[in-house]
Structures are given as structure tokens and as C-alpha cells.
Amino acid sequence: MRRNVPPAVGAVLLAATALLWNVLRPPVAAGESGFEVWAIDQSNTTGDGGGTLYIYDGATLTDPGLAGTAVPEVIDLGGAARSLCLAQTGTAPMRPHMLMFTASNTHAVLSFVASGHVLFLDAATRTPIACIDVGVQAHAAFPSSDGSYVVVANQNGKLLQRITTNYATNTFTLDGAATLDLVACTTPSGAACQDATLRPDNAPICPVIDATSRFTFVTLRGGGLFVVESTATPMAIVAEYDRTIVHPNGCGGIETAGKMYVNSGGGTAGNPVEADLYAFPISGFSTTPTPPNTPAPTLVFSDDSLGFVDSHGAVLTKFHRFLWVADRAANRIVVVETATDTVVNRINLVGPVSGDPTPDLMGISPSGNRVFVTLRGPLPLTGNAPGVNNAVGSTPGVGVLRVQEGGRRGVLVAIAPISHIVGGVEVADPHAIGIRPT
């Protein structure tokens, strides 16, 4: 029962609570700078889909004794963000799916997978400052490291689009002249971009921009991949790969040591399970187009023979010695040594903390001693093949993994639960995650 508290008493209680928090708040670990963990629950908060942003104090999540009861800052994306999008685009954003921070960590870029909205937020104040509707469906929006643009995968629109960005002035413009139509275009070799044999379904999944801010690696739902000169107008394909080289549904792209790692995964009716990882040599790409399927990537691993697999998110450990790739179906992390491109471990996440964690996307603390991962819920809204349930989990929230042996090993030590009960049913579905140094 709610009780009314006199204002004077309330003020005393608030002061006492603040004092107690300052006493009990875990100290930042040696060598660890302050940081926040941002996680997004895709489940609807409004009739047409708003979603919820949870922002956790990093020091709290780092302590396994406190992570399970961590109290995040909660922002209903069906509130101010929705109002801004309605005012600026005339339509409401639906299902927040992917989250990226700019290189300076001043802004967050959020894409809505059930609509075409890309939302820009001031990261420090959490204020939504601009909303752009790119059309059918914004699956992922990736900011360039030089801060000049964002590449958007308009998934069901089968378009690759570019938003010009100026974070100093908060100016964001959809550059229509830059758009690459992935169905109607022709590759440098003269082949149709979308082809029943080579690339049967050119819905772009995840665009990943390289460190030079010049080239974007674009994975495709039906398999295949394009490397695109994303500073050209219109954006131009400089390398083309077919489905025999790169399998469907890739979304874990990350660069280190002159290589771009790209995975393939499951989650669609036509390709419900899949787990592959490729390494592309960055030096093999230029503005001069290459022949099809060149330079050839290294196949780092293919776990398809292991059965129930679904490769998705990826993160580099400190000093980039190891690459972790999450397998949400198999409930494990595949550990790759980047110097040799060999699998050195597979971390099983099933245990006393969770019987079915279903790891999805990941981020790492500034010190490198913790990895944070979104854990899917029992009713996943995206990336789940009906009847297969590759993305169904039992403990929705943010998983905390202690990094061991410099990244060769790790263990799930705690979960900060995220819950959204509707009609007595748990509908929370965490997906996007980002780490913001403060």
C-alpha cells in the first residue's frame, strides 16, 4: 500500500539514502575508469512499440554481489524519444534494436528495427536530439569513427543509406544521393547484386565501418557480403562475395590487427541455425574493385556441424589478444586467438547463474576485466526462428562475465535482471548493449 510521507521527512530520507549509497557504492577497481552499461529491452512500452533503455553504473555491475540488485536509470523510449520522432518524421519509432556510441562517446545512435527510425541522443543528458526515418526498416546504424556519417542497414527496404552527421552542431541529414539499392544495383563484375544463385536475399543486416571511415562491410540476410566505399556518392561496391563464401545472417563485425572479423548466424526461417567466423584482410581493399570473392577471407571456424548453434555478437578482450563470439543457441562464447585465428576455448555459460542464458550482444569494461552481455527472454521479438527457438532464453537481463587469463577464459558470475510483465507473462527481450566511459 502506498503511504504519503511529509515533505520534510521525505527530504531527510532522501539525504540519508544518498549518504548510505555513497558509503556502500563499490569503489572503481584499480585501473578501471568510470563507465556506464546501456541495455535496451525491445518489448513494447506503448501501443505501437517504444521499448526501454536501462543505464547501469558500471562499478555496481562489476561487483557480482551487487549486480543482481542493481538499480538502473530507466528511460521509456515511448516517451520523449517517441514524441520527438513523431514531431520530426510524422511517424512513431518501433522496437529499438541496435545501439552504438560515437567514437567520442558524446552521442548514442539507436536504430528501430520494426520501423525506419534512427534516433540520436545526447549521451550525457540522455536527451533525444534528432530522429530520422529512413523508410521501411532500420536494422542497424553504424557511426564512422571520424564522426562524419552513419551507415544504416534498411533491412526490408534492401537499401544501404547514409546519414551525414555533425555532432558538434547536432546536425543530422539523410543523404538521399548516397543510397545504394541492393536489389537494383550491379556489382563491379557485372553481376546483379541480388541474384537467385549468388545472393538470393540482399536485405542488409549489419554494416560495419572500418577504422579509416572509408569502407563498410555489409552482411546480407540470404548470404554473401559487399564491401562498400561508403564515402562515395552514391556509395559504391568495391568487393563482392557470394553465399558460398559468406553464409547468411552475419551481424558480428569487429576490426583488429589489420583484419575485419565478420560472422554468419541463424535466426531466420530459411537459415535457423548457423555459426561461422571469417577474417578479411583490410589491406586487400581499395577504391579499385576486386574480382568476385577476393581477397579471400580466412574461415576461422564453422560450428554448423555441432548442431544447435547461432553466432551473433562479438567483442575483443583487452589488448585484442582474444575475440569472443557469442552463440545464443548453444549458450556459449567461442574464444578466438587473434594472432593465429584459431579457436582456443568455448566458454559454457550454463550453470548456477542461469540454465538458459542465451547470450546475444556484448561489450567490455574499460579495464577489460568484465564483459557484459544481453541475455534474451522467453518471448524474443527478433532473430528467432519459429519452431527452432534459437533465441529463446530463460533469464532476460544483463549478464556479467568475469574475464580470466587475459580473455582465454571467462565465467558468468551474475545477472542484472530485466523484467517486463504483461498479463502475467514475461515479455522482456534485451538485445542492444553499449559501454560508455564516463
Image: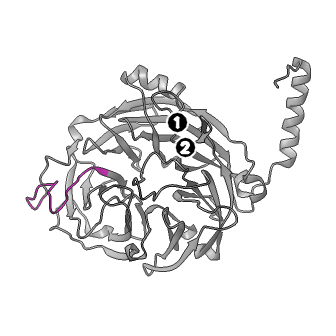
**Which amino acid type is marked by label 2?**
Ile
**Image quarter of residue 268:** bottom left
Q: Which mark is residue 330?
A: none
Residue 60, image x, y percentages = 73, 51
Q: Quadrant of residue 18?
A: top right
Find out whether residue 191 is within the magenta segment.
yes
Q: Answer whether labels 2 and 1 touch (C-beta < 8 Å).
A: yes
Residue drawn 14% across the image and 49% down it: 185
Return the x and y of residue 212 as percentages of the image width and height. Answer: 36, 57
Instruction: Confirm whether residue 125 shows in the render.
Output: no
Residue type pointed to by label 1: Gly
107 left or right, relative to 412: left
Which quarter of the figure is the N terminus placed in? top right
The label on residue 51 is 1
Q: Position of residue 296 (x, y in %)?
A: 25, 74
Is residue 289 or residue 19 the one in the foreground?
19
| Left or right: where 420 falls relative to 224 | right
* Residue 292: percent from left, percent from top: 16, 67
Q: Is residue 22 magenta?
A: no
Q: Give the overall secondary structure of the magenta segment.
A: loop
Of 262 and 216, nearer the camera is 262
Magenta stretch, residue numbers:
188-204
Q: How many marks?
A: 2
Relative to 30, residue 96 above or below = above
Q: How is the image coloured?
A: one colour
Q: Is residue 327 left or right of residue 148?
A: right
Q: Residue at x 41, y 52 (%)?
A: 383
Q: Which residue is mark 2?
A: 40
User: Tag 2's secondary structure?
Assistant: strand
Pick whichever, 312 or 102, lies toward us: 312
What is the CA distance from the residue labelled 2 to the residue labelled 1?
A: 7 Å
How many neighbours does mark 2 have within 10 angstroms: few (below 14), some (14-19), or many (20 or more)?
many
